[in-house]
Structure formats: structure tokens, C-alpha cells
Amino acid sequence: MVSFIIVSLVSGILFGVLDALINANPFARKLNEFYTPIAKTSINVPIGVVIDLVYGFAMAGIFLLLYESLPGEIGVVKGIIFALLAWFFRVVMSVASSWMMFKAPVKTLLYTLFTGLGEMLVLGILYGVFLEPWT
């Protein structure tokens, strides 16, 4: 239980840090200029931190619930498979929707797709290395 809490907190913090690195760098800011007319001018950081921590606990919990069903003999493989599943449902579906609904530049969509994959792999590997179901 202690490892679950620690990994959940770490993954929640990683969500925030990785999102900041992915979205606040100069290259990303240029790519995301498309969204300027509909983007907020400021971010509520405390609420963002709480949301990322909730995501960390939710993702770690879902990983543990699915653990036995995920392919692979070792945790890290299960973590990578989980990351690919999370990437599909969290990132790929969002990018596909944006592609259909907005005139978003392809570069922006591809950036989101690939940085999202990297983020999910980091988190999935974290879960796979440090989390196992309780016996």
C-alpha cells in the first residue's frame, strides 16, 4: 500500500512536470499558437496540481486492476503495454478528434501524438517497475 501511494504521488508530479516540459517549451508554444483564440490566458496552478495528483492515483490504480490481464511476464513489459493502452485512449483519440473538428496544423497534432507517447511510456514504465498487485 505504501508503494502504491508513493508511486501515485510521483506519477502525479510527473504528469505536471512532463506536461509543463511538453507544452511550455518554445517549440510547443509555436506549434500550439493555433489554439490561442480559445486558450485561457492563465492557468490555475493549484487546481492543476490537484488534477495531476488525482490522475496519478487513478492511473496507478487502473494499472493494478489490469495487472494480471496485461500481457508480459515482467512488470516493465506490463507497464509498457499499459502505457500503449493509456496513450491510445488518452492521446490518440484526442488527436483524432482534434483532426476531425479543427483546422489544426498536422505538425501540432503529430507533436501531441509523439510527446503523449513519451509521457505515457515514462509513466507506464514507472508503474511496471514499482507496482505489483497486493497478495
Image: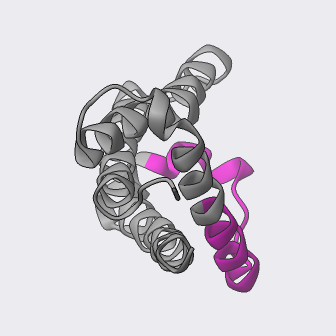
User: What's the magenta bit mostly, secondary-structure-wise?
Assistant: helix
From what the image shows, is residue 92 above or below residue 1? above
**Residue 89 within the segment the image draws in magenta:** no
> Over which residues does the magenta segment extend?
32-55
Q: Position of residue 82 (x, y in %)?
A: 42, 37
Q: Is 135 in front, or is 29?
A: 135
Applied colour scheme: one colour
Q: Is 16 in front, or is 80?
A: 80
Q: Residue at x 63, y 21 (%)?
A: 97
From what the image shows, is residue 87 above or below residue 52? above
Residue 123 relative to residue 67: left or right? left
Residue 72 relative to residue 99: left or right? left
Which residue is outermost to the top? 100
**Residue 49 within the segment the image draws in magenta:** yes
Residue 42 relative to residue 103: left or right? right
Q: Is 80 in front, or is 134?
A: 134
The N terminus sits in image quarter: bottom right
